[in-house]
Image (tube, coloured by chain):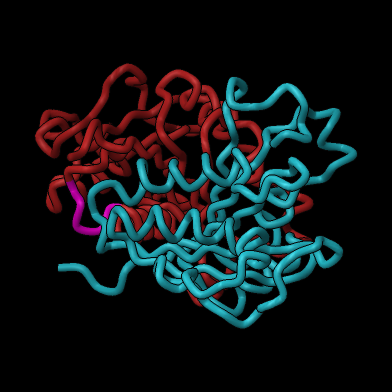
Chain colours: A cyan, B red
Amino acid sequence: MEGDPTRIMLAVNESTIKGYPHASISSRKAFEWTLQKIVRSNTSGFKLLFLHAQVPDEDGFDDMDSVYASPEDFKNLRNRDRARGLHLLEFFVERCHAIGVGCEAWIKKGDPKEVICHEVKRVHPDFLVVGCRGLGPFQRVFVGTVSEFCVKHAECPVITIKRSAEESPQDPVDD
Amino acid sequence: MEGDPTRIMLAVNESTIKGYPHASISSRKAFEWTLQKIVRSNTSGFKLLFLHAQVPDEDGFDDMDSVYASPEDFKNLRNRDRARGLHLLEFFVERCHAIGVGCEAWIKKGDPKEVICHEVKRVHPDFLVVGCRGLGPFQRVFVGTVSEFCVKHAECPVITIKRSAEESPQDPVDD
C-alpha cells in the first residue's frame, strides 16, 4: 500500500543553440534516466516537478506564476510565447501525460543555481535530479556547474546525471 | 513492461559505538529512504547491493569473497564472525527478504571512499546511495566525508542522504 507519490524535482533547461527552444541533451538524459531507472512501471508512485530556471537577460517568457500540468494547459498560448521557455515545459509535460505520470511544470527567472535551491526550499521535493554536461576538469574551472552548487546547497537529496561521452556534441555550445 | 531491475548500491557502515556492531544511523536512514521513496511498492523493479567497506585495522571479518543474498546465507557462521561486519549485512539482507526486494551484500577491506568507488567500477550499479552524518562546516573540514568523495569520483550517479538534525546523536561518536 502506497502513500503520497514521491515528488521528484527536475531542473530542466534549453539547448544553447540559438533560436532552438528545445530541451538540452542533458535535461532529456536526466528525464529519461528518471523514468527508466526510478519511475519504471510504477507511474502512480511518482510525481515529477519540472522547473525551468530562466536567466533574466534571456529573451524569454514572462508569465512566472503559472503551473502547467497537462498538454491542454499549453493550448491557448500565443505563438510568440510557445516559441520560448514554455515550449521546453510542453515537451516534458506531454511525455509525462503520454505515459501517465503526474507532473507540474513552471518557470522562474533568475540565476539557475539560486532559483533551483530557492524552489527546493519552497516546494520540498523528496529529491532533485539535475542533468550535467560532464565537462572536463579544465572546462569546469571556468564554467562552474549548477549541479555542483545544488549538491552542496539544496535542502534535499540531489542526484546528478552526467551525460555519457558519446552523447556530448563536438562543440559544447550545441548542448 | 519492465526490463532488468534497477540496481542500487548502498554503502553501509557500522555504528561507531565501540563493540556495538549494528548499522549506523546514517546507513539505516539511507536504506529506509531508498525503500520509501524509490522502491515503494515496486519490489520486483529493484535490486539492492549492500557494500560494507571495512577499514583494514578494524578487528573485523576476514571473508572478502562471499556474497550474501538471503537470511539463510548467514546461518552457518561461527558466533565470532556473526558479531562483526557480517552482523551488519545480515540486518539489511533480512529486511530486504522480509519485504521481497532482491539483494546482495558483501564486505571489502580498505579505505571506504576508495573501496566504494572501486566497487562501483567493478559492479556497475545504476546509482549509488550514501548516507551522511550531516556534519557542520567546521567538523567537515577535519573529517572530510566519504559521501563528498563519492559524489566527485564514483562512476555512476550518486545520491547523498543526510540525516535530519533530530536524528543526530548529541555526541557524533554515537553515530
* Image label count: 0
Magenta stretch, main secondary structure, is loop
Residue B175 visible in rendering: no
For the record, the magenta segment spans B39-43
Residue name at image x 77 percent, y 26 percent: A171
Left or right, A31 with reference to B151: left
Residue name at image x 47 percent, y 33 percent: B53
| Residue A151, percent from left and from top | 65, 54
Left or right, A136 with reference to A6: right
In the rendered image, the residue lying farthest to the bottom is: A65
| Residue A20, percent from left and from top | 69, 45
Tell me the quadrant of the picture where the N terminus of chain A can be found: bottom left
Residue name at image x 30 percent, y 36 percent: B86
Residue name at image x 78 percent, y 35 percent: A173
Residue B9 visible in rendering: yes
Front-most of residues A13 and B161: A13
Location of residue B50 with respect to A102 vertically, above or below? above
Front-most of residues A70 and B115: A70
